[in-house]
Image (cartoon, rainbow, N blue to C red):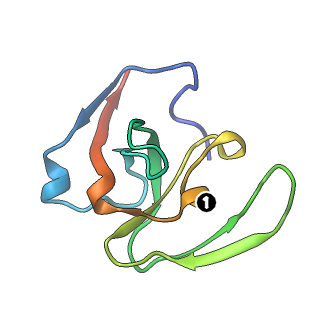
């Protein structure tokens, strides 16, 4: 996956309204409240929606061990564009819809 956001920073325009009316879809870039630290708001890409079967490498740097999960109802599977240096659903599991803060519309 080609990284969309630069690790040193970007200016983003995100909206918060449609998350109440429209569920996120695959490929959307979303702002979430971190399940590990509620004070952080990481930006991740939605790779799987509820009911999807996702296979992923647990640690792409040190191993080739795959894990497969089914995304539960009411959750999304998110992943960072920099897969070798990203804490995402591979680490903390699928994210509930309630932790999604908004969807990115535009990047500068």
> What is the quadrant of residue 12 in the picture?
top left
Categorize mark 1 by other alpha carbons within 10 Å: few (<14), some (14-19), many (20+).
some
Q: Position of residue 70 (x, y in %)?
A: 51, 80
Residue receiving disc 1: 90
Q: Secondary structure at mark 1?
A: helix
- Is 89 positioned to the left or the right of 107 in the image? right
> What is the quadrant of residue 82 in the picture?
top right
Q: How many marks?
A: 1
Residue at (69, 73) in percent of width and height: 67
- Is 46 positioned to the left or the right of 96 in the image? right
Q: Position of residue 28 (x, y in %)?
A: 38, 50
Residue at (41, 78) in percent of width and height: 72
Q: Position of residue 86 (x, y in %)?
A: 62, 43
| 33, 67: nearer the viewer | 33
Image quarter hosting the C terminus: top left
| 90, 34: nearer the viewer | 34
Q: Is residue 26 above or below residue 14?
A: below
| 1, 72: nearer the viewer | 72
Q: Position of residue 76 (x, y in %)?
A: 40, 64
Residue at (36, 45) in percent of width and height: 33
Q: Is residue 58 above or below residue 14?
A: below
- Is 55 positioned to the left or the right of 20 in the image? right
Q: Is residue 60 above or below residue 33?
A: below
């Amino acid at each position: 996956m080609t990284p969309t956001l630069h690790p040193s920073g970007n200016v983003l325009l995100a909206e918060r309204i449609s998350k109440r009316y429209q569920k996120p879809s695959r490929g959307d870039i979303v702002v979430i409240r971190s399940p590990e630290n509620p004070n952080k708001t990481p930006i991740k890409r939605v790779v799987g929606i509820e009911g999807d079967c996702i296979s992923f490498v647990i640690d792409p740097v040190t191993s080739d061990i795959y894990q497969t999960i089914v995304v539960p109802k009411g959750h999304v599977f998110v992943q960072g564009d920099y897969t070798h240096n990203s804490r995402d659903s591979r680490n903390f599991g699928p994210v509930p819809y309630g932790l999604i803060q908004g969807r990115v519309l535009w990047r500068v």
